[in-house]
Image (tube, helix red, strand yellow):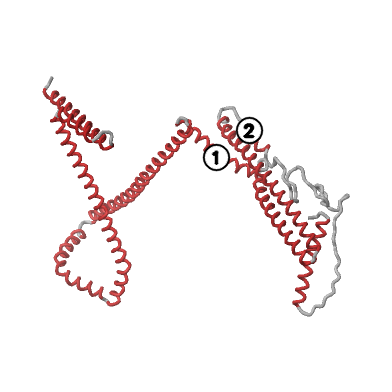
Amino acid sequence: MPEVIQQIKIIASFQSDISGMKKAINSLEKMRASGAISQSTFEEWNKNLEEQNSGLYDTARGMMAYEQKQRELNKKQQEAKSGARKLTGAYLSLMFTGMALTRVFGGMVKSVLDVLGIGEMLSATILVVLLPALEPVAEILYAIMDFFMNLPEPIQKIIGFIVLIAAAIGIVMTVVGMFLTFFSGGWAIIGKAVVWLWGLFTGFVGWVAGALGVSFGAALAIIIGIIVLVIAIVVGAIDAWKNNFLGFKDAVIGVWSAIKTYIMGFVQFFTGIWDIIAGVFTGNTDKIKQGFGLMGEGIKNIFKGIANFVINIINTLVSLVLVTIAELIRGLEWAWNKIPGVHTTIYKDIMAAGAGKNLIPTFQQGGVMPYTGLAMVHAGETITPKGESMSSGEITTINNSPTFNITANVSNEYDVRKLATELNKYWTSDMERISKARGMI
């Protein structure tokens, strides 16, 4: 065996023995620190290690001590670097503060110096001082300028072209450098953001996989499915609103209308209670009757609002579920129609079949019915058939033209306004009473 190879093997074996001895010593010290062995046991085992191979033991101890010193030195270097950075930051802060103070207050000082003429005098003084030193230099500069000015015109053109080309190259390089710096910096930031987002996403997928007890691929498929479902719901809701799919638009609007009806019912109910109390204390029987009527209307509107709210919520959810299924079919249909010679219109047929058709009719509050359905008619109410007016056939028009005889003394404009106010209150109360008695409202 060659001598070099033999030496390499000896060195490698020695390094392996040193590494094993260091690991043994570290293990003993960790066991003593954790309380796994007592101090006496540690000393005994440590002594056995030293007796087995004192030279190897001493070498390992020396290397461990050197490594410890090296770690301490590195730590001190890091602390020194941190202190230097802090000191540099403090110096920069001081510099920027000085620049800011100079910019703010230096302008004020300059204005005062300009007013006093000190700036011009100082400039003239410096000019006088510099003239003797610049005169020899000026002669050299004059000679250089004279040399260039006396050059033949073709050479001047060549020099001018060189100068212009150099200036153009400089501008181009500056612009290119600016853009490359911008894109390199932007790419670095975007790259870091993409890496961070990818790590966040894979971590989230891993967490889902652990929570559900499935593989990473299965968890990823579940998340993608949820994302696709959310997109289908959003797109489906937009399409359902546009063509009022299964009354989706009416149902969404009806939810808010039901809430307003519910609130209005409570307002009417408590207003009726107040009218009853006011009628009892004032002896106004009409006010008491009006109060009971308002309480009844309020209770009716409360239950009507609850019923319409529940019905519209059901309509909204059912429409949303069905239109979401239609949107998923739309995606499959798009892929299927890519096959040559194949074309289906399932999605369009579904949306056309459900356009403007409500699932469950709600309690109407008058006006034009948007669809054919059941309706509750109250006593005294009149239904006008489509295409007919209130005066045709057996349908009659209810007219109420009361006659009032008023005896009053009017002496000024204030009496006229007061009389008009009282008449308005009386007519309003009387019309409400007659209308309710006949079932008109």
Point out residue 105 in the picture as x, y percentages from the top left corner: 31, 69
Q: Residue at x 69, y 42 (%)?
A: 356
Residue tagged 2 = 346
Q: Nearer the viewer, residue 283 or 406?
A: 283
Please state if 401 lies on the left or on the right of 20 as rendered: right
Amino acid under label 2? Ile
Q: In the picture shown, does residue 361 fall above or below 45?
A: below
Label 2: how many residues lie within 10 Å, few (<14), some (14-19) or many (20+)? Answer: few
Q: Amino acid at mark 1?
A: Ile
- Distance from Cα at disc 2 to Cα at disc 1: 19 Å
Front residue of 204 and 245: 204
Residue annotated with mark 1:
231
Q: Residue at 79%, 80% (x, y): give it.
A: 411
Q: Where is residue 418 shown, x and y percent of the image?
A: 76, 73
- Which residue is pictured at 67% across the width and 51% down the height? 257
Residue 326 in which image quadrant: top right
The residue under the point 22% across, 73% down is: 122
Give the left or right position of residue 318, taking residue 94 as reference.
right
Q: Are marks 2 and 1 in contact (CB under 8 Å)?
A: no
Could you tell which of marks 2 and 1 lies nearer the N-terminus?
Answer: 1
State which quadrant residue 156 falls in: bottom left
Q: Position of residue 259 (x, y in %)?
A: 66, 51
Residue found farthest to the bottom: 411
| Mark 1: secondary structure | helix
Q: Quadrant of the N terminus?
A: top left
Neighbour class for label 1 at 10 Å: few (<14), some, many (≥20)?
A: some
Using the image as rendered, state which of residue 338 and residue 68 is in the foreground: 68
- Please indicate whether residue 421 sits to the left or right of residue 253 in the image: right
Q: On the image, which quarter does residue 27 sit in?
A: top left
Q: Name the secondary structure under disc 2.
A: helix
Relative image position of residue 195 (x, y in whole percent): 39, 40
Q: Note whether 191 is above or below 59 in the view shown.
A: below
